[in-house]
Image (tube, rainbow, N blue to C red):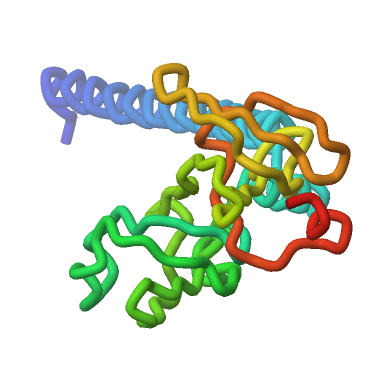
Amino acid sequence: HRRDKHNYDSYDDDFYETKKSKKSKNRDYESSNRHRKKYDNDKEDSRYNYDSNTKHDTKDDKTKKTKNQSSSSWLTPNIRVRLVTKKISKRSQYYLQKGIVLDVNYDKKASSETKTAVIQMLDGQLIEHVPEKYLETVLPKVSTTTTTTNHVIVLKGMHKFAKGKLLEKKLNDGQGIVQLYEDKNIITLSLDDIAEWCGPLDDDDDGYH
C-alpha cells in the first residue's frame, strides 16, 4: 500500500519536531551544566575569599583580650562599695547599701571572664558572686581630725593600686585631691577612679598618718 502523502509529511514533521526537541533538550542540559559549574566555581571562590579575608582569633588574640579586660577592671579586695542593683537573688533589701569587698573571683560561666565579688554588708551578711557592673565605689568623708584616716586607693591610670589620703573632694568637677603615701606626691584624680581603702597599709604607708 502506498503511504498517504499527507500522513507521510505529517510523520516527517513529527520526526523532525522530535529530533529538534531532543537537540533543544541537549542544548538546555549543556547550558544548565555550564551555569551550574560556573555557580559552583563562584561559590568556591567566594568561600575561599571569605576564609582568607576573615580574621579568626588566635590564642594570642584571646590572651590580649583577657589582659585588656583585666586591666580595665577596677574591682579589688578591701575597698568599700555600694550595691546598685536589685537583681541579686533574695538580697534586694541591700539595694544602695554599703559593704566591703572581701574577695574577687572570675566568673568562668561568663564569656568575657567577668570579675565577681564577695561583699560583706554592714550587718555582717555575705553576698557572693556580685558582678562588677552592679557595684560602685564609695569614698570616705574628708576630715582634718586625727581620728579620721581618709584612706583611699587608686583604681585606674598610672597610679593604679597606689594608696593615699583623700585631702579634698571637688564635687562640682567630679575630682578628688589625693596625697600618695609612697612618694608624698599630691595628685588630682577623677572621683570614679578612687575608692575608700579598708584594708591594711604597707609598712611605708603606715607611718604616714
**Residue closer to the observer: 61 or 92:** 92
**Residue at 42% of width from left, 49% of height from top?**
136
Badge count? 0
Where is residue 109 shown, x and y percent of the image?
Answer: 50, 71
**Residue closer to the observer: 115 or 52:** 115
**Residue closer to the observer: 25 or 206:** 206
Where is residue 162 shown, x and y percent of the image?
Answer: 76, 46
**Residue closer to the observer: 50 or 78:** 78
**Residue at 50% of width from left, 30% of height from top?**
169
Question: Residue 190 vs residue 199: left or right?
Answer: left
The residue furthest bottom is: 125
Residue 57 visible: no
Looking at the rendered image, the quarter that the N terminus falls into is top left
Q: In the rendered image of this protein, does residue 42 appear above or below residue 75?
A: above
Question: Residue 133 vs residue 146: left or right?
Answer: left
Q: Quadrant of residue 121?
A: bottom left
Q: In the rendered image of this protein, does residue 97 appear above or below residue 6?
A: below
Q: Quadrant of residue 178?
A: top right
Where is residue 43 shown, x and y percent of the image?
Answer: 57, 33
Q: In the rendered image of this protein, does residue 69 appear above or below residue 107?
A: above
**Residue at 41% of width from left, 54% of height from top?**
135
Where is residue 39 shown, x and y percent of the image?
Answer: 53, 29
**Residue at 38% of width from left, 56% of height from top?**
82
Residue 33 visible: yes
Question: Residue 35 vs residue 95: left or right?
Answer: right
